[in-house]
Amino acid sequence: MAGVRQFDEDTMLEDALALFWSRGVAATSMVDLANATGVQRGSLYNAYGDREAIFLRAYDRYAERFLESARASLTGDDAGHMLRRLFDSVIDSMFAGETARGCLTTRTAGDGSLASQPIRERIRHMLGDFIAIVTEALSRPGVPEQLTLEPAQAAELVVTFTRGLAVMERVYGDRDALLRSAGSLISAIAPDAKRP
Amino acid sequence: MAGVRQFDEDTMLEDALALFWSRGVAATSMVDLANATGVQRGSLYNAYGDREAIFLRAYDRYAERFLESARASLTGDDAGHMLRRLFDSVIDSMFAGETARGCLTTRTAGDGSLASQPIRERIRHMLGDFIAIVTEALSRPGVPEQLTLEPAQAAELVVTFTRGLAVMERVYGDRDALLRSAGSLISAIAPDAKRP
DNA sequence: GTCATTTTTGACATGAGTGTCAATAACCAT
DNA sequence: ATGGTTATTGACACTCATGTCAAAAATGAC
C-alpha cells in the first residue's frame, strides 16, 4: 500500500459537508469543493469518482448527527417537553452556521438532486429513521395519553412539519417565526403541554 | 408599432410554466424553454431579457391559480370541511400533470432560486396571500370555536404544513400518504371534524 | 536501495449554457 | 409603396463545469 493519501479524509469531508450545506448540492461544483477543501480536483476524482459519491459520504455524517441530536432531545415521558426540545434542536441546526443553512435534507430534496437514485435512497432512509425515532418516543408508556393523535400519526405529522419549517426558513429566514409555528403544532397535538 | 411578435405570448407562457413546473426552475435552461415553447432563444431574449423574467411571468400565473383554487376550496363555515377541501386541492395540484410536479413554490424555494431577490419577493408574496386567505376563512363567524388554535396561528400552521407536504411529495411521491398526513393535521386542529 | 503501487498535478478535450449582435425578414403607419 | 420600427434568425464569443490522462512525486514493502 504505497502512494499514500495526502489529505485527511475526515477534515476534507467536514469541509465538503459545510459547503454542501451552505450552498446546496446542486450549486456546488467540483471546483468549489476543491477550493473549499484544499484538495485538488483530480485527487477528488481519483479518490471518490464523482461529486455524488462525495456528497453521499458528507450526507451520511450529516444524517447521523441530525438523528443523534433528535434522539437526544426526545428523552423523558412528557410529550410537550420532548416536542419542544425536538423542534428547538431542529431549528437550531438550521441556524447554526455562519450563514443560515437550513436543513440539508430538505434542500437536497428540493434541489433536483432526487433524480439520483442513491441520493433519493439516503434521504428516504434518513426520514424513515427520523419518523421511527419520534414514533418510539411518542409511544412510551404514559405518552400516548398526552396526545390528540396516535403516536405513529403524530410522528409522521411532526416530521412532515419539520420539512415545512425548513422551507419556511429558506423563504423568510425568521427563526422566531419558526419557533412560534412549532409551538402551535405542539399545542395542537399535545394540548396540555405547558407553554414555554 | 411594426414588426409584430410571431409567437403567442399566452401559449408560450403556458408552455414555459409547464416546463418550469415539471423540471424545476434551476434545471430549466433557455434552450429547454426554446424547445418546449417553439420560440427561438433569441426571440425570448429579445422579448423578455432573461430566463428569470420569463419565470416570473409564468410564476405569476401559477400563483394566481393556486390562490384562486385555495379560495374556492375555503367556502362555508365548517372548519373540517374547509381544511379537507383545501388540502385535497393542494395535493391534487401536485399530482395533476402527466408526471407528478409537486408544488412550484416549494420547488423554487429549494432550488437555489431564492438567491434572486425578485423571485424571493414573489414567493413571499404568494405565501403571505395564502396565509391571509386561510386566516380569513378560519376567522369566519362560528369557525374559531371549532379550532384548537387561534385562526391566525392555525393558518400559519396549515400553510407551513403544506410546504412539508410538498417536500414529502418530492421524496416519496405517495399521494395517499400525503392525504393521510393532512388528515392527521386536520384532526389535530379541528378535532370535531367528521372523518372522511 | 529499489520496485511497485498509488496519489498528485496540470493539461486537455468536451459539452452545455449564456448573452450579444448583425443581418434579414416582417409589418404598420403614413 | 415606402420608410421606419420591431422581431427573427443563426452565428459568435465567453464562461463554467465535467471527466480523463499521462507524467511526476511520494511512499511502503521487499
Image (cartoon, coloured by chain):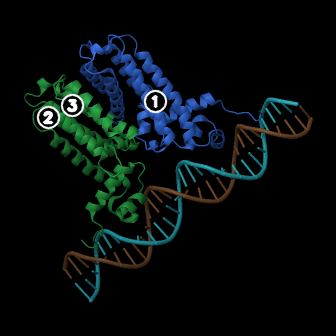
Chain colours: A green, B blue, C cyan, D brown
Give the letter of the chain under mark 3: A
**Mark pair 1, 3: CA separation:** 29 Å
Q: Is residue B74 left or right of residue C12?
A: left
Q: Which mark is residue A137?
A: 2
In the image, what residue occupies the spot 42% across and 29% down?
A: B128
**Mark pair 2, 1: CA separation:** 36 Å
Nearer the observer, B144 or A61: B144
> Which is closer to the viewer, label 1 or label 3?
1
List x then y, in percent, for residue B19. Answer: 51, 35
Residue that numbered label 3 is attached to: A155
Q: Is residue A131 above or below residue B70?
A: below
Quarter placement of the C terminus of chain A: top left
Quarter placement of the N terminus of chain A: bottom left
Residue that numbered label 1 is attached to: B126
Query: Do the residues at discs 2 and 1 belong to one chain?
Result: no
Provide the secondary structure element on which disc 2 rests.
helix
Name the amino acid type tagged 3. Answer: Ala
